[in-house]
Amino acid sequence: MKVMKFGGTSVGSIESLRNLKDIVNAEDKPVIVVVSAMGGFTNQLLAMCEQAQQRDISCLDGLEQARQRHHDAIDGVVVESMRAEVHATIDRFIDESLKPYYLALATNPHMPVDEIERVCDAIVAHGEILSSAIVTGMFEDGVPHLSLNFMRTQRDGAGRVLDWEETGRLVKEDFADLTEGVHVAQGFISRDKLSGDVTNLGRGGSDYTAAILATLLDAEALEIWTDVDGFMTADPRTHPDATVIPQMTYAQAQEMCDAGAKVIYPPTIAPVAMKNIPVWVKNTFNPSAPGTVIVN
Ligand code: ADP
Ligand code: ASP
Ligand code: MG
């Protein structure tokens, strides 16, 4: 079984979602697909949190644009028999969850700081919740999973870390029946082990979710599907002469990620390296390119 993670640009347009579908359909099943929010939507959700805190109710306009973007994607890629249900899911999360959260932020000037943080964490989780509903609906044999049910974090000083023990137990339960189908889970999102509050693994954290699942479920490979041909000698946005590195060791990849190579979120490497699971970096927009493999 493979874990295939698709980043924001890979789920960000009808064209890229169609590529995703072809890439996943070419695999032996079962397969686990981990998705990010549609490209740019996480930033947008957070910018709207800022707006709402300034009592700027026009943040709700942004929500309507996002609604339209998700509905357009559904019409472009979701199997016909599932479309009505997925449209309704998107509307329900926007109307019954996101809107009330934004209104609470915008209308409560005395909200304590930790409550603001709690509400914004709950809001930002919707990026992956909405994109995963669409991706699940693209496959006749799509099986939805909710990462909030099995990813557990705990407080660690000012930040949060994964609780491996509790997450391991819950992941094995949630994926107990992994015999066929396309299993779709949200990257990035989690819950606090003690409070049950919605939390996340940090910006870019969907890679880490995929690595955690691959490690706990002994996947044969972890594939990071993104918008470049592989792990490159430098960021091609700033270094147009950068070239793809066909093969790297975990240590080399870790070093480059720690130095800021955004293509993989740094905590992703260690767990898969411990289990010797190969990591592939591949381009959703150019799937025939060989990509990069990261091994021992
Ligand atoms: P995704 O949304 O798929 O997770 P990211 O934007 O997080 O994608 O990561 C992919 C981006 O990482 C590329 O578009 C590229 O600009 C940037 N990047 C930075 N350093 C590197 C590198 N060494 N090799 C490849 N891409 C890199
Ligand atoms: N959607 C989250 C972010 O933009 C997580 C991810 O894409 O990996 O940071
Ligand atoms: Mg990323």
Image (cartoon, rainbow, N blue to C red):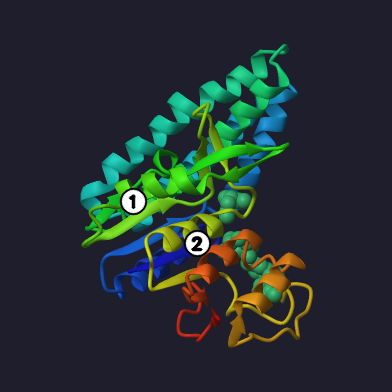
Where's residue 207, x and y in %? 54, 60
Give the amino acid at mark 1.
Answer: Lys
Q: Residues within 10 Å of mark 2 (few under 14, many from 20)?
A: many
| Quadrant of the drawing holding the N terminus | bottom left
Measuring 66% from the left and 19% from the top, which residue is drawn there? 106
Q: In the image, residue 288 lies at what x, y percent?
A: 45, 85
Q: Is residue 121 visible?
A: yes
Q: Which mark is residue 172?
A: 1
Label 1 sits on a secondary structure element that is helix
- Percent across and percent down for residue 80 are 24, 52
User: Considering only order in the chain, which callout, 2 or 1, is on the residue closer to the N terminus?
Assistant: 1
Disc 1 packing (10 Å; few <14; some 14–19; many ≥20): some
Q: Which residue is mark 2?
A: 211
Q: Amino acid at mark 2?
A: Ala
User: Residue 184 falls in which quadrant of the image?
Assistant: bottom left
Q: Ligand 1 is located in which of the four quadrants? A: bottom right
